[in-house]
Image (tube, helix red, strand yellow):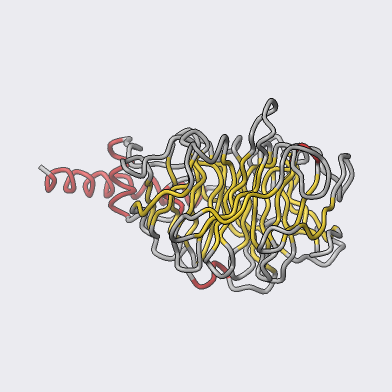
Amino acid sequence: MSYQIDLLIKRIALLLLPLALAACSSAPPKEIFEPPLYPAPPDEPRFVFERSLRYNTNVEPVTTTTKLRRYATGSVDDVRGLVKPFGVAAREGRVYVTDTVQRAVILFDIAGQRYKEFGREKPGQLFKPAGIDISRNGEIFVADVSARRIAVFDPEGNFQRFIGGPDWFQRPAGVAVSNAGDKVYVIDTGGVDSPAHHLFIFDAQSGAHLATIGERGNADGQFNLPLQVSGSPNGTVYVVDKGNFRIQAFDEAGRHKLSFGTIGRYPGQFFSPKGVSTDPQGNIYVIDTAFGNAQVFNPDGELLMVIGQRGQTSAPGNYMLPAGIDVDEEGRVYIADQFFRKVDIYKPIGLEENGGKAE
């Protein structure tokens, strides 16, 4: 049966080839796509849009036979992708995205030209995955808001263990692994009627509780609906203190170092901060959902630049509900947008296209 289908596809292709050639000869010239630059001219650009991830077809190779089969049968059943992405973590050409609607982690393996979904099966079943991070040995740590625990998977999505649980957390939304890989930082958002707004520290392997930082409030070291957390190369831990419209920085032991940010609508201020990440130089990247962009700060909390803008279309650089952000070891920036169901990737100016990896 498969042989007959393949034969039919080849015959259709031969019949359609003259039409395709005629269409190509009369088609108008394509517009040249100019990828967005940030900052925009006349400032010297530091990042350029590289690609978007939405579907498995963005990373999996599509053969001529596959294209013809789809054309002949009208089938798109093999197309899978993002529904409501939240968190994103990337390393060595692998991009892991949490999807709160699909209750899974989506892996776009750019280097390996693979697409994979995991987290739907017991014992590591996910219910509302949000924050995500990758340890130095490649393990994937996922904050599950509904299950009230951290699930740990190997790089291929095989479940390893849980950290924390309902006895510890109310709404664990963010997770980060220390640069050394020995500690796990968990943000518990708590709730509007709860004083339990905390930054927890656990042992990354044993899951032993090491410290609980903060409580509900607006003083240094206190939180009001904290949401996400990120570690930096020098060990500093950054927390999105959403309800206080600021970023707080702590050392590896949880001691407060500095805070920056105020409520407002101007660059350098926050209105709805959500995601946070750091680059290899220690700069801090903060997603603001209301602004539809990522603001980049130096380690002292001084604004350097902005990436992206609020937009009504899903064009590169446009965002309606950006949520997660990550910066990989080469300095690429990954921004996940819930509304447009995509992850946009920006590469530093001068970095090799796709890092020498697959298209």
Return the residue nearer the eye: 36 or 110. 110
Residue at position x 35%, y 51% in the image:
159
Residue at position x 57%, y 49% in the image:
343
In the depicted structure, whether residue 238 falls above or below residue 9: below
Report x, y in % for residue 84: 53, 36
Q: Is residue 348 left or right of residue 357?
A: right
Q: Is residue 201 visible?
A: yes
Q: Count how many numbered circles sit on residues in the image.
A: 0
In the depicted structure, whether residue 293 falls above or below residue 234: above
User: Which quarter of the rendering shows the N terminus?
Assistant: top left
Residue at position x 64%, y 42% in the image:
323
Q: Quadrant of residue 330?
A: bottom right
Report x, y in % for residue 98: 50, 44
Return the residue nearer the eye: 141 or 334. 141
Q: Residue furthest left?
A: 1
Q: Is residue 353 left or right of residue 306?
A: left
Report x, y in % for residue 257: 79, 60
In the depicted structure, whether residue 186 falls above or below residue 82: below
Return the residue nearer the eye: 139 or 199. 199
Return the residue nearer the eye: 14 or 117. 117
